[in-house]
Amino acid sequence: MNSTLAPSTSTSSKLAATKVRSGGRKPPQRAVKNAFESYTDNPVVVTGDFHSNWANDIRSAREESETIGTEFIGTSISSGGDGSEYTDFGGDESVVFGKYVVDENENVKYNNSRRGYTRCTITPETWLTEFRVVDYVTERGAPIRTDATFVVEAGVPGVRKP
Protein backbone atom coordinates (compact mmCIF):
# COMPACT_ATOMS: atom_id res chain seq x y z
CA MET A 1 0.00 0.00 0.00
CA ASN A 2 1.32 3.42 -0.89
CA SER A 3 0.49 6.70 0.79
CA THR A 4 0.24 10.13 -0.71
CA LEU A 5 0.60 13.42 1.08
CA ALA A 6 -1.24 16.44 -0.20
CA PRO A 7 -2.54 19.73 1.12
CA SER A 8 -6.03 19.47 2.48
CA THR A 9 -8.92 20.96 0.54
CA SER A 10 -9.38 23.63 3.19
CA THR A 11 -7.92 27.11 2.79
CA SER A 12 -4.94 26.21 4.99
CA SER A 13 -1.77 24.71 3.55
CA LYS A 14 -1.81 21.77 5.94
CA LEU A 15 -0.84 18.28 4.81
CA ALA A 16 -3.14 15.27 4.75
CA ALA A 17 -2.15 11.64 4.20
CA THR A 18 -4.38 9.34 2.19
CA LYS A 19 -3.88 5.67 1.39
CA VAL A 20 -3.92 4.51 -2.20
CA ARG A 21 -4.45 0.82 -2.85
CA SER A 22 -2.89 -0.62 -5.94
CA GLY A 23 -4.12 -3.82 -7.50
CA GLY A 24 -4.06 -5.54 -10.83
CA ARG A 25 -1.97 -4.05 -13.61
CA LYS A 26 0.48 -1.31 -12.73
CA PRO A 27 -0.22 1.95 -14.56
CA PRO A 28 2.57 3.50 -16.63
CA GLN A 29 4.73 6.00 -14.75
CA ARG A 30 3.55 8.90 -16.91
CA ALA A 31 -0.10 8.11 -16.09
CA VAL A 32 0.69 8.10 -12.36
CA LYS A 33 2.54 11.42 -12.64
CA ASN A 34 -0.36 12.94 -14.59
CA ALA A 35 -2.82 11.78 -11.93
CA PHE A 36 -0.66 13.37 -9.22
CA GLU A 37 -0.48 16.64 -11.12
CA SER A 38 -4.21 16.67 -11.86
CA TYR A 39 -5.58 15.62 -8.47
CA THR A 40 -3.05 16.39 -5.72
CA ASP A 41 -0.47 18.95 -4.80
CA ASN A 42 2.84 17.82 -3.33
CA PRO A 43 2.24 14.03 -3.23
CA VAL A 44 4.49 11.78 -1.14
CA VAL A 45 4.75 8.15 -2.19
CA VAL A 46 6.07 5.61 0.32
CA THR A 47 6.82 2.06 -0.71
CA GLY A 48 9.30 -0.63 0.19
CA ASP A 49 10.81 -4.08 -0.06
CA PHE A 50 13.05 -2.93 -2.88
CA HIS A 51 16.07 -4.15 -0.85
CA SER A 52 17.50 -0.62 -0.80
CA ASN A 53 16.63 2.84 0.50
CA TRP A 54 15.84 5.78 -1.79
CA ALA A 55 14.71 9.40 -1.45
CA ASN A 56 13.73 10.95 -4.77
CA ASP A 57 12.01 13.99 -6.15
CA ILE A 58 9.11 13.10 -8.45
CA ARG A 59 9.41 15.07 -11.64
CA SER A 60 6.49 16.41 -13.67
CA ALA A 61 5.19 14.41 -16.62
CA ARG A 62 4.46 17.72 -18.30
CA GLU A 63 7.64 19.66 -17.50
CA GLU A 64 10.67 17.44 -16.71
CA SER A 65 12.50 20.15 -14.77
CA GLU A 66 9.59 20.72 -12.36
CA THR A 67 9.45 18.79 -9.08
CA ILE A 68 5.87 17.85 -8.16
CA GLY A 69 6.34 15.47 -5.21
CA THR A 70 8.51 13.05 -3.28
CA GLU A 71 9.16 9.31 -3.28
CA PHE A 72 10.56 7.35 -0.33
CA ILE A 73 11.50 3.70 -0.80
CA GLY A 74 12.46 1.55 2.17
CA THR A 75 14.84 -1.40 2.29
CA SER A 76 14.25 -4.92 3.54
CA ILE A 77 14.75 -5.75 7.21
CA SER A 78 17.15 -8.66 6.69
CA SER A 79 16.94 -10.29 3.25
CA GLY A 80 19.91 -9.87 0.95
CA GLY A 81 22.59 -10.15 3.62
CA ASP A 82 24.38 -7.24 5.23
CA GLY A 83 23.88 -4.83 2.36
CA SER A 84 26.27 -2.07 1.36
CA GLU A 85 26.49 1.69 1.20
CA TYR A 86 25.03 1.90 -2.31
CA THR A 87 22.78 -0.37 -4.36
CA ASP A 88 24.64 -2.58 -6.83
CA PHE A 89 21.69 -3.15 -9.21
CA GLY A 90 22.83 -6.75 -9.66
CA GLY A 91 26.42 -5.78 -10.50
CA ASP A 92 29.73 -6.50 -8.87
CA GLU A 93 30.80 -2.95 -8.03
CA SER A 94 28.09 -1.61 -5.73
CA VAL A 95 29.83 1.55 -4.61
CA VAL A 96 30.83 2.56 -8.13
CA PHE A 97 27.49 2.01 -9.88
CA GLY A 98 25.18 3.04 -7.03
CA LYS A 99 27.12 6.25 -6.42
CA TYR A 100 27.02 6.97 -10.15
CA VAL A 101 23.20 6.72 -10.18
CA VAL A 102 22.94 9.22 -7.31
CA ASP A 103 25.53 11.59 -8.78
CA GLU A 104 24.09 11.56 -12.31
CA ASN A 105 20.39 11.94 -11.46
CA GLU A 106 19.57 15.21 -9.73
CA ASN A 107 16.14 13.92 -8.67
CA VAL A 108 17.80 11.10 -6.66
CA LYS A 109 18.67 12.56 -3.27
CA TYR A 110 19.67 9.39 -1.40
CA ASN A 111 20.43 5.72 -1.94
CA ASN A 112 21.64 3.14 0.54
CA SER A 113 21.56 -0.64 0.43
CA ARG A 114 21.87 -1.35 4.16
CA ARG A 115 19.18 -3.34 5.96
CA GLY A 116 16.66 -1.65 8.25
CA TYR A 117 13.42 0.28 8.06
CA THR A 118 11.98 3.70 7.28
CA ARG A 119 10.33 5.74 10.03
CA CYS A 120 7.93 8.51 8.98
CA THR A 121 6.63 11.23 11.28
CA ILE A 122 3.73 13.17 9.76
CA THR A 123 2.22 16.43 10.95
CA PRO A 124 -0.08 18.85 9.10
CA GLU A 125 2.98 20.97 8.24
CA THR A 126 5.76 18.43 7.56
CA TRP A 127 6.56 14.86 6.61
CA LEU A 128 9.82 13.65 8.19
CA THR A 129 11.41 10.40 6.98
CA GLU A 130 14.30 8.71 8.79
CA PHE A 131 16.18 5.86 7.15
CA ARG A 132 17.09 3.55 10.06
CA VAL A 133 19.80 1.00 9.23
CA VAL A 134 22.11 -1.61 10.67
CA ASP A 135 25.57 -2.34 9.29
CA TYR A 136 25.14 -6.11 9.49
CA VAL A 137 22.40 -8.71 9.87
CA THR A 138 24.52 -11.86 9.59
CA GLU A 139 25.18 -11.87 13.34
CA ARG A 140 23.33 -10.65 16.42
CA GLY A 141 23.76 -7.31 18.12
CA ALA A 142 24.02 -4.77 15.31
CA PRO A 143 23.15 -1.31 16.61
CA ILE A 144 20.44 0.59 14.73
CA ARG A 145 21.27 4.10 13.55
CA THR A 146 19.69 6.83 11.46
CA ASP A 147 21.63 6.96 8.18
CA ALA A 148 19.73 9.89 6.66
CA THR A 149 16.78 12.14 7.45
CA PHE A 150 14.64 14.04 4.94
CA VAL A 151 11.70 16.41 5.21
CA VAL A 152 8.83 17.47 2.94
CA GLU A 153 7.05 20.69 3.82
CA ALA A 154 3.39 21.46 3.10
CA GLY A 155 3.13 23.41 -0.12
CA VAL A 156 6.78 22.82 -1.10
CA PRO A 157 7.16 19.86 -3.51
CA GLY A 158 10.30 17.77 -3.20
CA VAL A 159 12.53 16.37 -0.54
CA ARG A 160 15.25 18.16 1.39
CA LYS A 161 17.52 17.57 4.36
CA PRO A 162 16.26 19.23 7.57
Image (cartoon, rainbow, N blue to C red):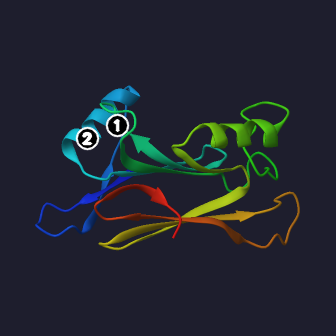
Residue 56 point in image, percent of width and height: 51, 47
Mark drawn on residue 92 = none
- 159 vs 79: above or below: below
**Left or right position of 87 against 59:** right
**Left or right position of 133 against 2:** right
- Local SS, label 1: loop
Residue closest to the eye, 22 or 111: 111
Tell me the kind of residue under disc 2.
Glu
Q: Crowding at label 1, few (<14), some or many (≥20) Cα neighbours within 10 Å? A: some
Disc 1 to disc 2, C-alpha distance: 7 Å
- Local SS, label 2: helix
**Left or right position of 65 against 51:** left
Q: Which residue bears the numbered disc 2?
A: 37
Taking the spot 20% from the left edge, 39% from the top edge, the residue there is: 38
Residue furthest out toward the right:
139
Residue closest to the eye, 117 or 93: 93
Tell me the kind of residue under disc 1.
Ser
Q: Earlier in the sequence, mark 1 or mark 2?
A: 2
Taking the spot 74% from the left edge, 47% from the top edge, the residue there is: 86
Taking the spot 46% from the left edge, 57% from the top edge, the residue there is: 159
- 32 vs 52: above or below: above
Q: Which residue bears the numbered disc 1?
A: 60
Whether pointer 1 and pointer 2 mark residues with C-beta atoms closer than 8 Å, the reply is yes
Residue 122 point in image, percent of width and height: 39, 70
Residue furthest out toward the front:
65
- Residue 1 seen by the camera: no
Residue 102 point in image, percent of width and height: 64, 43
Residue 39 point in image, percent of width and height: 20, 44
Q: Crowding at label 2, few (<14), some or many (≥20) Cα neighbours within 10 Å? A: some
